[in-house]
Each structure stands twice: as C-alpha cells, then as structure tokens.
Amino acid sequence: MFVDLGTGQPFVPTPSYFLGCFDIYDREETLGEELEKFNPNDPSDREKLILKYCLVSNRTYRHRFLLYKCLEKALQDKSFDFQSLFRYDPEAYSSFPYGWDEMENTRAFFEDIYRLATIEWKDDLQKASLEDQSTWVTLG
C-alpha cells in the first residue's frame, strides 16, 4: 500500500478525493459564493470548475497517478453510484454548493475530470506509469 510521506498514512484514493476542493463548509461566503457563479450541469462551466479547482493540487505525480487510476476504475464500473458522492449528509462537516446534490449527470462530471486529467496530468501519469509501483513506499 502506498504511504503518503507527508502524513505517514496510507493513501487509498476514491473518486470523492476529486470533490474536496468543492467543500464549502464554513466557507459559504467565500468559496461558496464563487462556486455558485458556475453551473456544474453546463459542460463549459464544468470544465472551468475542474481546471480551476479540481486538478490544481500539491499532490505528487504518484498521488495523481493513483487518483487517476482510481477514477478510471470507477468509470469502468457502469453501476458505480457517482450521485451518492454528492448527497448531503447532515452529520458530516462538509457541504457542496446549493443544488449540486441535484446535478443532472454526476457521471459526466467525473468523465470530464478524467478527460481533463488525462491532458493536464499527462507528464505525471507517464512518469508514474514507467515506474514499478511495487517499489513505492509501502507499509510492512
């Protein structure tokens, strides 16, 4: 299992990792107001959201590779419930902008993340794919 050297914790990504940048909990007046300018159902707005918030990160090329592969696997599963990732949980200390839990096609949102990551992270994905992932830092 890949260990994040920054935290010392196992890094086990899920597609929800791509949504953390859209969490407006306690930032409704800042990030929330900014995100409400976009319509995640509109392909043009969706692309702007993904490029501006989602794919810009301080993750290493290995993190990006694992995130990408995790998303690839979820997209290959025709029964994967992307909508569940947007459901409001009153017990959680997180929330998305108003209306995002009613997004028309959450799969399309993640397909666009994948498509754009393929372009934006091309060099990182290539670099990681050439390495033997079994030699990456692991537990045990």
Image (cartoon, rainbow, N blue to C red):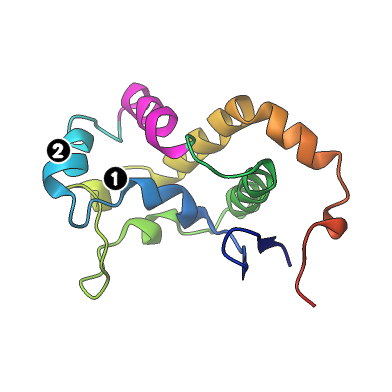
Q: In the image, is residue 130 part of the stretch drawn in magenta?
A: no
Q: Is residue 72 left or right of residue 26?
A: right
Q: In the image, is residue 47 part of the stretch drawn in magenta?
A: yes
Question: Which residue is the site of mark 1?
Answer: 103
User: Percent from the top left, x then y, of residue 3?
Assistant: 68, 64
User: Percent from the top left, x then y, of residue 96?
Assistant: 25, 52
Q: Residue furthest left?
A: 29
Q: Count the marks: how many?
A: 2
The amino acid pointed to by label 1 is Met
Q: Mark 1 or 2 closer to N-term?
A: 2
The residue closer to the viewer here, 88 or 8, is 8
Instruction: Give the SS element for disc 1.
Output: loop
The residue closer to the viewer here, 139 or 117, is 139
Quarter of the image that includes the N terminus:
bottom right
Question: Which residue is the site of mark 2?
Answer: 33
Q: CA distance from mark 1 to mark 2?
A: 18 Å
Q: Is residue 131 left or right of residue 38?
A: right
Mark 2 neighbour density, 10 Å: few (under 14) some (14–19) many (20 or more): some
